[in-house]
Structures are given as C-alpha cells and as structure tokens.
Amino acid sequence: MSLAQIARTLGLSITTVSRALGGFDEVALATRERVRAEAERIGYRANTTARRLQSGRSEAIGLVLPTNPGQFDDPFFLRLMAAIGPALASAGLDLLVMAAPPGPEEMRAYRHLIDGRRVDGVLIARTRLHDERIALLLDSKMPFVAHGRTQDPRPHAWVDTDGAAAMAAATERLVDLGHRRIAMLTAGPGTNYGHDRETGWRRAMTRHGLATDLCCEALPTEVEGERAARLLLASDATAILCATDRLAIGAMRAVVGTGRIVGADVSVIGFDNLPFASYVHPKLTTIEQPVEQAGRTMVSMLLQVLAGADPATLNTMLPTRLIVRGSDGMVAKNPEIITGDHHETPIAHTS
C-alpha cells in the first residue's frame, strides 16, 4: 500500500499523488478527491514523520486553555474543543492542548509552542482587553485565530458574538418585567467578554435612567458567583444579569440561600446556554451563543490564514439568542429582603 500503487491505479505521477494527499491547492480539487478516495479504499496511511520533515510543518494546531492543568471542567472549553478537534482532524491536523493559568506560566506555554514551530498555528480562547498572548503571536508572526476581540489595534482574525447587544436586550426584558434594581455580575479581571456584556447592561440601564451602582466582578465559577451575588442581594437587587451560566448558577444558590425564590422574588439571567442550564431548578433563562459554530469557524479561518489569506479580512460576528425559561419573571410587588446564611435550604442543582 504505497503512493506508487495509488499513482498506477489512477494514472497519475507519484508527485501529483503526494501533493494531492498533502492538500496542495495547485492540484485540482477533483484530483485530490479521487486520490483521497483511492487511498481510503486501499487503507493507505502516509508516513507522517517523513511528510512533516519534507514540508517543514508540524501539522498540529495549539490551544492553551487559560486554566490550571487538570481543571478542564469548564463546560465552555469542553464544547469549544469538541467542535475544534473534529474540524482539525478532517483537515488532517492534530490538536495540541495545554493548560496554564493566565500570567507568566501561560506566556511560557505560548513561547514553548512558538519556539521551534511546534505547531503551525494557534487558537485562542477567551480574549482579554489587553491581551499579551495576541501581542506575542502577532510579533512572532505565528498564524492564529482568536475567540473574541481585543483592544489591540493591529488586525488579526477573530470570531465573536455581540455580547453588548445581547446583554442590553436581556436588560430591556427585565425593565419590561418591572425591575429597576437590576444588578450585573460580570467576569474578570480584564476579560473582553465580561467587559462587552457589562457595557451592554450599562447602556440599557442608562437609557432608562436607572442606576448602574449594582455591579460586581467575579471569576467565572459557581463559588465566585454565589459570593458576589450575596453582595448584590444585600443591596436590594431584584434581578441579576450574569456574564456566564456558571456565575448564574452561583447567583441562584445565593438567592435561595437568603430565603427567596428564583424567578419569583429575584430574577437571574445567564449567558452561554451551557447544557446544564435546562436541568437546574428553575430552568435558567440565558443567552445562547453558538459555541460549536464558533469552534468550526475558527478552524476554517485558521486554514485560510495558513493558505495565505489576509487575517484582517477574517472577522466574524455570530448571532446570539435569548432563551426564556423559568429563572426570571415579573418584579415582586413587595419583595421581602432577607439576609443571613441558610445553608440547609435546598439550592439550585444540576442533577
């Protein structure tokens, strides 16, 4: 089972067969498809080591998750990787996943990928307003695509959603339901998506002449969401908008822990529409962003960049959708403000 055998069967040169399997554009698409079909029929597997040495490419794409090693439990990252992996595999590329907390350790991980060209390109998850990762990749001329925008003025490829518009629409819904003390639980520090979503809330609140004093920043975890939400509830918030679903789950726990009912006494709205959102009680009203579509689009863009496309032309804004469930509702007529810990009270759960 060799290149020569495929070449003889199809009446092509070995060079043409080799370049067809390598995906080179100078080989006609119809020829590439014929060669791949014949290779699949006879069970041909290329000598990848030899091919990589010959081409000077690693045929791998890097993804550094901004979290501690061993903590891959964030559903957002899992959904993103679940889309990226198969899309890269269909293009004959491997996915090299690393994890490092934001800061010096994370930057060392990126330099490790860049040095010696261990990967042909990089995908970035959850951008920051001032993102050292993007600056490093731009300076090193490493091809990349980012999930999210930044304030770096240099053009680069990115996929994002309009979190500001989405959160403004969610705020408008709460205003229509009679809420005036609408709090914002944002993600930080310095994340682009947290800033974007907070901006939408502020714009909508200002448009209605409502105070924007109820804003709290937290790391995007359930524990941090509960902690921050307790502070907001102590300031008479009747509704809490959350930058992520994980923060929203923590906020729901905080509401129940103070003796109130989610959706009746205090409304909670999340962002992401992660799988557990429809299994908590009450079901979480949230803003859906197409994570899987974003992952596939990022791969498509990166392949275009690797083929020579101008990254400045590769910017895509994906749509969002507000999914109304049971965690938000009309403002309570006479909301009873209860403080203190109630650890024995049943909480929002994912079972």
Image (tube, grey):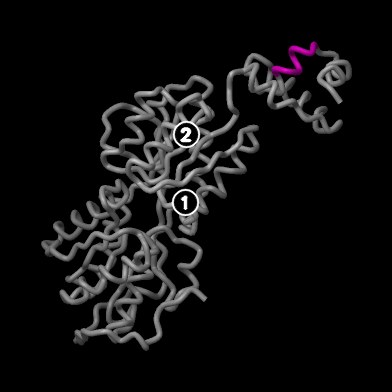
Q: Is residue 301 above or below residue 215?
A: above
Magenta-colored segment: predominant secondary structure: helix
* Residue 37: quadrant of the picture: top right
Mark 2 and mark 1: Cα distance apart in space: 18 Å
Three-letter code, disc 1 = Pro
The residue singled out by tag 2 in the image is 122
Task: Give, as a single range, the part of the protein colored magenta.
Answer: 13-19
The residue singled out by tag 1 in the image is 69
Please provide percent x and percent y for residue 289.
Answer: 43, 53
Q: Residues within 10 Å of mark 2 (few under 14, many from 20)?
A: many
Secondary structure found at label 2: strand
Q: Is residue 139 magenta?
A: no
The tag earlier along the polypeptide, 2 or 1, is 1
* Residue 108: quadrant of the picture: top left
**x 22%, y 68%: residue:** 175
Please provide percent x and percent y for residue 297.
Answer: 50, 39
**x 86%, y 26%: residue:** 1
- Of badges 2 and 1, nearer the viewer stands 1
Direction from residue 346 to residue 14 in the image, left or right: right
| Nearer-the-camera pick, 173 or 3 | 3
Q: Is residue 18 magenta?
A: yes
